[in-house]
Image (cartoon, rainbow, N blue to C red):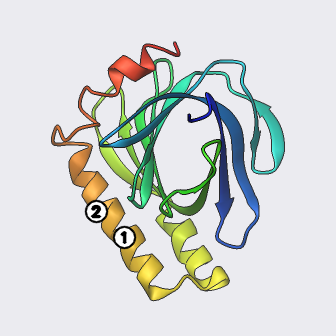
Amino acid sequence: MPSDVVRVIYRKYDGSAHRDYPARRLAEDELGVWLGVTEGTKSVYHGRPSVEQIPFVLLVPHHAWWTGMFNPPPRTSEVYCDIASPARWENDDTVHLIDLDLDVVRRRSTGLVELRDEDEFAEHRARFGYPDDVVAQAEAAARWLLDALGDGTEPFATSYRKWLALVV
């Protein structure tokens, strides 16, 4: 039986700490594993202790090069997708991801979908030596998300709302 609590660990390509937090397993479906993080959850962000001020739901897809974070107001991003390596699960209670810098975000107030951190991706690609296949997968995931966040593709249209309602 899967664990109720999952430790989510994001690292950068060089192995340095990026994000680390516990999340509650909400469900698993054809899209992936849905995890909930409540307000007040203790976390680590860029290697420093932090506390989540706004709850969110994280979708960890089964085999994709991204994760999706779904946010309630007042967060200005309704959906925030990190381009990341496909999830590597350690047992059922820890998921490891490598953050590849690029982010695709849908703004709450305008619905604008934007690609962020291209400069960081280029810098880390050179510094850390991202292999060509990793670059190609990251760029393809970003292109797909740019369309999917704007055209009504699930889970970005409405299906995430039932999970978000469980943590707000």
- 41 vs 74, nearest the viewer: 41
Query: Residue shown at 46%/18% (left/top)?
Result: 73
- 47 vs 167, nearest the viewer: 167
Q: Quadrant of residue 2?
A: top right
Image location of residue 53, percent across then percent down: 67, 22
Instruction: Kindly indicate whether the residue at mark 2 contacts the one at mark 1 (C-beta within 8 angstroms).
Output: yes
Tally the numbered discs.
Answer: 2
Amino acid type, callout 2: Arg
**In the rendered image, the vertical position of residue 30 relative to residue 88, given as above or below:** above
Query: Residue shown at 27%/33% (left/top)?
Result: 111
Query: Residue shown at 44%/78% (left/top)?
Result: 135
Image location of residue 55, percent across then percent down: 57, 22
Q: Quadrant of residue 13?
A: bottom right
Crowding around mark 2 (Cα neighbors within 10 Å: few <14, some 14 to 19, many 20+) is few
Disc number for residue 93: none
Q: Which residue is mark 2?
A: 143
Image location of residue 65, percent across then percent down: 42, 61
Give the SS element for disc 1: helix
Q: Is residue 162 left or right of residue 26?
A: left
Give the SS element for disc 2: helix
Disc number for residue 139: 1
How far apart marks 1 and 2 lie (CA) works out to 6 Å
Query: Residue shown at 52%/27% (left/top)?
Result: 56
The N terminus lies in quadrant: top right
